[in-house]
Image: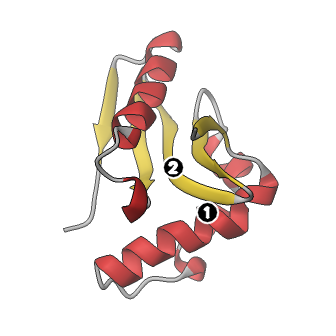
Amino acid sequence: MIKIRPHAAPDTEALLALILGIQCGEFGLSIGCEDQPDLLDVAGFYRRGNGEFWVADGGEGSIAGSVALIDIGDGRMALRKMFVAPAQRGDGLAARLLDVALVHARAHDAREVLLGTTD
């Protein structure tokens, strides 16, 4: 079973493979690791204030999904880096990831969770 847990430093390589694979391979975006320095410093970027970054641990070093919240102040958080591996789509993993983020936001008295995305 896939376990959702906070990101840890050893997850970085698998996380990059998941996210870049989706961004570049599926969506055709011209984006690389250098364009997303937040992924190389998850603790420094996401864990300020009440922010957090979670991964869906697929076992044996694989990452099946991710979701993050950034504390942007004034009772607001921004939802970021929500990705699910193609093999896990349709099994409820995206809903589980979103639920973890929203439970966290409520627990930290967030009034709003905002979403920004690419076209």
Q: Which mark is residue 26?
A: none
- Against 10, residue 24 (above or below) is below
> Residue visible at 59% across and 46% down?
55
Horizontal side of 101 relative to 9 (left or right) equals left
Horizontal side of 29 relative to 55 (left or right) equals left
Horizontal side of 89 relative to 103 (left or right) equals left
Pick the front one: 79 or 27? 27
What kind of residue is marked 1? Leu
Rate crowding at label 2 as few (under 14), some (14 to 19) or many (20 or more) other CA atoms within 10 Å: many
- Against 25, residue 69 (above or below) is above
Pick the front one: 82 or 50? 82
Circle 2 sits on which residue?
A: 66
Q: Pointers 2 and 1 in contact (CB under 8 A)?
A: yes
Determine the secondary structure under disc 1: helix
> Residue visible at 34% across and 17% down?
111
> Residue visible at 43% across and 49% down?
80
Question: Where's residue 77, x and y in %?
Answer: 42, 32
What kind of residue is marked 2? Ser
User: Residue 101: in sight, yes or no?
Assistant: yes
- Against 112, residue 66 (above or below) is below
User: Residue 73: in sight, yes or no?
Assistant: no
Q: Quadrant of the C terminus?
A: bottom left
Q: Quadrant of residue 96?
A: top left
Determine the secondary structure under disc 2: strand
Of the residues under marks 2 and 1, which one precedes in the sequence?
1
Q: Quadrant of the N terminus?
A: top right
Question: Where's residue 70, x and y in %?
Answer: 51, 40
Circle 1 sits on which residue?
A: 15
Q: CA distance from mark 2 to mark 1?
A: 8 Å
Rate crowding at label 1 as few (under 14), some (14 to 19) or many (20 or more) other CA atoms within 10 Å: many
Taking the view exactly as shown, the residue that stands out farthest to the front is 1
Horizontal side of 9 relative to 53 (left or right) equals right
